Every structure is written in structure tokens, then in C-alpha cells.
Image (spheres, rainbow, N blue to C red):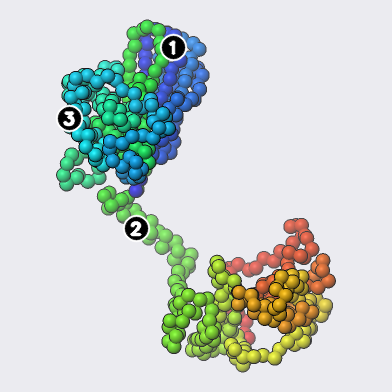
Amino acid sequence: MAIHVALHHRTSYRYARRVVLGPQIVRLRPAPHTRGRILSYSLKVQPEEHFINWQQDPFGNWQARFVFPEKTDHFVVEVDLVAEMAVFNPFEFFVEDTAAQWPFAYANDLKKELLPYLEVEAPGPLLSAFLAGISREMTNTVDFIVDLNRRLQQAIGYVVRMEPGIQTTEETLGKCSGSCRDSAWLLVQIMRQLGIAARFVSGYLIQLTPDVKPLEGPSGTEVDFTDLHAWCEVFIPGAGWIGLDPTSGLLAGEGHIPLAATAAPQSAAPISGGVEPAEVDFGFEMKVTRIRETPRVTRPYTDEQWQAILAEGHEVDRRLAKGDVRLTTGGEPTFVSIDDMEGAEWNTAAVGPIKRRLAENLIRRLRDRFAPGGLLHFGQGKWYPGEQLPRWALSLYWRKDGELLWHDPELIAEAGTEGSAGAADAKRFIHRLCAKLGLEEDYALAAYEDPAVHLLKEAQLPPNVDVLDSRLKDPEERARMARVFDRGLDTPVGYVLPLQPWNSRHFGRWASERWSLRRDRMFLIPGDSPLGLRLPLQSLPWLPEADYPYYIPADPFAAHAALPAA
């Protein structure tokens, strides 16, 4: 779980008189290679009368250049940012095979690009002695840099040093102590002397009090704090720049927010610029505040938070009960044939030779057991990606008051029953339906398979095959083509009657309309779905939205009277 923290940093210079303030370079914006997320950032500078230009230095770091046209007696820089303290693994990188073992050599092109980070100072006697104590035997590169960082942390004590500038490597080694910037620059020089490209990094360090004390080792900070900090980054082929903090002896983590990474320390100064001589009062303030914390294993909800959560839950329950909202649960039990448990249709295939028949047998038995007189409905179910056709769905509807919805079960044909109904029967049925509903017969339209689509498919077949035995690889496509040509393209597939209940609740009327299409007949969209799902609705006359025949169904949650008797 991440913690969001707000960092505030204020630096102020109060001059004894009004002075000319030269251009000031401020390097206090998180660098582009910051690994942690910076959620917000602001930089404010006084005096307010100034010009600002955001730039990137030759190393890609952000820097703001301020120009002050008037004399001033103060100069104040304030930074506010919000950072996400999400723990990441500092060892999450790969090293190229050519650099997996140290000593290694950079490729020529890469070495040219890294030249500023390989430039060394002439080593003094102390640094030479330190380097002489480092074994040159082949070793794992990551282990080598981690061990060298740890070794330097143990050799150089950390001190808070307010004097400006950076100690030389000889000074730091001679005193066996230094500030974070002194240790960082010493590690940079050591790495370069050993042939490893290194750069100096200036940035913010945020350290938060741990939730629990460690079982061994240092316990860490007792309070949340932040400060300006410095560390070293080394370039390892494949891994890129790796942060090493010689003050702690650890790799840079989520609390390290780099502001500037440069070849020389002076190029990474947080603020640099000129000012005419004057007495000055320097002020510095930094603080970090936790602004968002989510419960986690090491810091779960408090008892008070749990009580607030439970109280909110009880309030939700009360409001649901007051509104008569009832919650139900559903499920999808899976059935497998006892006679063919390993068959494809019960494990991987959508359909099969007996699944449809057994499914209908099951729902009929459920109707006889739970809902005698219930209405069976066989329709389209889910359509899964990669499957040519949708699954079928068998549904059962009944009335809770015991009134029958269906009186003659024999009128519902069973699966596998060969019926004799054809186009003539469908036409006779649709005309009788029109008479029953008080509509003219010419509202009903005959629907046909589109000959253009199927004749094109026929033309694409090899010349030595028949459309009734097309030899297509897809069995469903073969069956579809054979079925269409066996029926005949001039034979209706069925009939369509546009229908809408028009004030039927009060007057018992039904409304229809005469569909006009660009082609003389209604040709269906190709496919195997039921006719009603293949209507060419996009071919109907265009209407502006204001003229749509909108039909607004009743609210299913609205109060309604009891259903009428059958």
C-alpha cells in the first residue's frame, strides 16, 4: 500500500539593504528519471516581480532560471510537492552479459557517451591506498558495487556540515567523516578510478517512521523527516543508472527523490546565482506530512476506524430495509452427462450431439416439478468471443399466484422432432395473426436470404465441387451453404410483422407500419441466428431523432396492480 506525503521546502535570504540580484538558477524540481510518482508540484519565488524560464541542462535535469528586474531586500524559494511513497525493489533490473562480472569494459560508443562520468581527479596518497585495498579479481558486478557502497559507509562517519562546498577526497578519507555530499563525491571518484561511470546526485530524502520495529539491525528514524541529500549513481550496461547512498550503505529507494544528476557537484547545487555584497540572514525550513495512508498488514484499521465502518454498514442496512430493497443471490450450476463425462460438449465445445436434447429434458422436468402451466421459452443466450454462433438459452416463466400461462404442453415441439411446417404455414400464421390483432395483411413482409452474398460465395468455390457438398473446411459454413441452396434463394425464410403495443393497456390496440426498403424484397443479414436477429434495420428509411417513434417501457420497480386472471 502506498503512502502519500506532502513535502514543503522553504529557503530564504534577507538582505540588510536592497541589492541587485543576478540571474538565479533553481534546481529543485524532481528530475525526469525519478522512480517514485510525483503527484503534484509547485515552485514559488519572491520577489513576485520576476521572469522565469524553465530549461533542461546538458544532463537533462530541470532547472528554472529567474531574472529580477528591480533591486530587492529578500529572495525566497518555496517548493511544495506530493509524492507517492510506494515501495519498489531497488534490485529490479537486469545486467547485460558483457557487464555481469567486474572488471568489465564499456563498448566504444557507450564509453564516448559516458566520458563526463569517467573523468577522474589525480588521486592523493589516501585515495591511492584505499584503491589499492580493493581486489581486482573477477566478481559479480552487482555484488561488487553493493559491497563497495557498504564498505564506504562503514569507513566514513556521517556529520552535519554547514560550511559551503565539498571536501576533497583526501580530506574526507583523512577525517574519516563528512556530510552526505562529501561521501557521495568520494564514492563517485572511487567508482571512476575503477572504470565505472558515476555521477553526483542532489535530491530530497524522505524517511518515515516504520510501522513496526525490526527484529534486528537499526530501528530507523523515530519521526518522519525530510532533508536535502546527496548520493551517487553508477551506470551498469543493461541496468542503467543505479543509485547508491554511501551515507546509509544502501541502494536508493522510494524515499530518494533526485533533483539533479551531474558529472560535477557544483552543477547540482540546489540554488546558484550572483548577488552584490551585503549582510544576509539565511533561513531554511523543511517538513514532510502524511496526507493519505491506507491500512496495511503492518498498520491495520484501528478499533475506532472499525467501529465507524460497522456503524456505516448498519446505516446502509437501515436505509435498505426502509426502502424495502431485498438482496438475492444467483448461481450457474454446471451439469455434465452421466453417460459421457469426458465428451467435448461437456468440457470444451459449445454444443454437441446430445447436450441440447438433455438440456430441454431437464427444463421440462423442472417445469413439471416447480411450475406446472409455466411458459417455456427457447432463445439466444451468451455469445462468446471466437464462437461463430451464440449459445442457446432455455427459460421458464410462471405466475406466483398459480394462474397458468400455458395450457397445452403438446404445442411445444420437443428437440429433435421433425416438423412439417414450411413457408406456406408461416404465411398462413402471420395473416391470421394480423386478423387477430386488427391489422391489414400487407403489413407482413416475406424475408429472404440475400442472394448476392450466397451467389458470391458460390462463385468463389472450386469449379469441381457442388454447392451442396462445398468441401469447405468449416463444417458450420458447409452446412449453412448447403441449407440455403437446398431451400432455394427465391423461397421465403419466414415472415416479419412490425408490431408495437399502442395504448394496449387501455384500448387493446396494436400498431404496425409498412416498411419500405431500397431493394424490392427484405433480404436478411447473413447468418444462422433466428430471423428476428437478422433484420436489415439499417436499411429502413432515415428519420431525424425528433421523429423517432420512441417507446418507453414501464418502470419495473414502479408499483403496479395485481396481474389479471387468465
At label 2, counting other C-alpha atoms closer than 10 Å, the crowd grade (few under 14, some 14-19, many 20 or more) is few
In the rendered image, the quadrant that contains the C terminus is: bottom right
Residue at point 64% right, 75% down? 472
Q: Amino acid at mark 1?
A: Leu
Find out whether the residues at labels 2 and 1 contact each other: C-beta distance under 8 Å: no
Between discs 3 and 2, the one toward the N terminus: 3
Q: Nearer the viewer, residue 176 or 73?
A: 176
Residue labelled with disc 1: 21
Q: Nearer the viewer, mark 1 or mark 3?
A: 3
At label 3, counting other C-alpha atoms closer than 10 Å, the crowd grade (few under 14, some 14-19, many 20 or more) is few
Between discs 2 and 1, the one toward the N terminus: 1
Q: Nearer the viewer, mark 2 or mark 1?
A: 1
Residue 282 lies, with reference to residue 10, above or below; the image says above
Q: Amino acid at mark 2?
A: Leu
- Label 3 SS: loop
Q: Nearer the viewer, residue 502 or 462?
A: 462
Residue labelled with disc 3: 133
Q: Nearer the viewer, residue 540 or 101?
A: 101
- The x, y position of residue 478, in whole percent, is 64, 77
Residue at point 34% right, 44% down? 97
Between discs 1 and 3, the one toward the N terminus: 1
Residue at point 39% right, 18% down? 272
Residue 244 lies, with reference to residue 355, above or below; the image says above
Q: Nearer the viewer, residue 464 or 183?
A: 464
Quadrant housing residue 15: top left
